[in-house]
Image (spheres, rainbow, N blue to C red):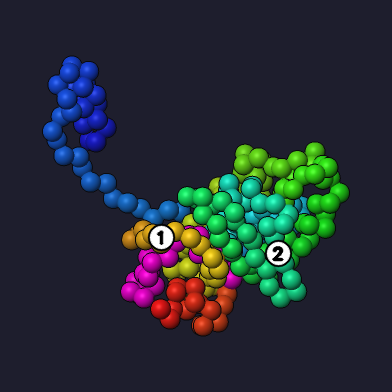
Amino acid sequence: MNLALAAVDHFNRFLGLGPAIVSREPLAQSAPRALSGDEQRALVRAAEAGKPRDRTIVVPLLYTGLRLTELVALDVGDARISARKGLLVVRSGKGDRYREVPLNRPVRDALEAWVKVRAKPIADGEPALFVGPQGRRLSPRAVDMVIRNTARGAGLELSAHVLRHTCVTNLVSPTTAKPTRSLRSSGPATRWPPDGMRSASPTSQRAATPDRLAGAALDGRAVARCWGWPR
């Protein structure tokens, strides 16, 4: 129906009559796709069976909620890891926002393994964390292919955006591991996720953005800090 109304609008504009004054049909908003627990475990197993670089691409996207472009833009110095903690520095996220994303143990382990291998094919002066066979920064398309190929190894079809939505869904679901948060994030918080993805619990609907999410299990006090409690 809405497509037909849009066609009428275009025809009226072509005739110089202006848009048709007709209300459109409201469309139901469905929740973005997210992986189930079994699918997440299958994906992690497929990533662990692959190359260290491919594992280090898939696991952080699943557990931190980074955007594809943010992952591609990471430099080696943006991964700060010690024996018991670590974080990724996103220097220019959506809206040109800077933030620091804490890392859980699986992400730290994957990054440490990749950094050791990365030194071999690196081109002179290349700062990128993720590089290809020629030692240069991977393109978003190349990273997307890594994700899709790894997913096929787990019998799945998905994109980087599905991993991001999975991280968010893990946050709002009471049956999944609790997330961590970005330590620093500038700019106003937006309502996220949409209503279709929110938990039934009112307290789980406090303002949170995908930039504050990652997929590590935490104790109750850390979860409270993730949500901004106490105020």
Q: Is residue 204 magenta?
A: yes
Category of crowding for the residue at label 2, using alpha-carbon neighbours closer than 10 angstroms: few (below 14), some (14–19), many (at least 20): some
Query: Residue 207 appears at what percent x and percent y?
Result: 38, 67
Q: Residue 166: in sight, yes or no?
A: no
What span is in magenta?
197-216
User: On the image, which quarter does residue 229 sit in?
Assistant: bottom left
Sequence order check, earlier mark of 1 and 2: 2
Question: Label 2 belongs to which residue?
Answer: 80
Residue at the image position 72 percent from the left and 48 percent from the top = 128
Category of crowding for the residue at label 1, using alpha-carbon neighbours closer than 10 angstroms: few (below 14), some (14–19), many (at least 20): few
Q: Looking at the figure, which quarter contains the C terminus?
A: bottom left
Under circle 1, the secondary element is loop
Q: Looking at the figure, which quarter contains the N terminus?
A: top left
* Position of 197 relative to 92 (above/below): below
Question: Label 1 belongs to which residue?
Answer: 188
Main secondary structure found in the magenta portion? loop
Q: Amino acid at mark 1?
A: Pro
Residue at the image position 67 percent from the left and 64 percent from the top = 107
Query: Residue 200 appears at what percent x and percent y?
Result: 34, 71
> Horizontal placement of 209 versus 76: left or right?
left
Residue at the image position 23 percent from the left and 46 percent from the top = 26
Q: Residue 73: in sight, yes or no?
A: yes
Q: Is residue 173 magenta?
A: no
Under circle 2, the secondary element is strand
Q: Amino acid at mark 2?
A: Arg
Is residue 48 or residue 209 the one in the foreground? 209
C-alpha separation, residue under disc 1 versus residue under disc 2: 26 Å
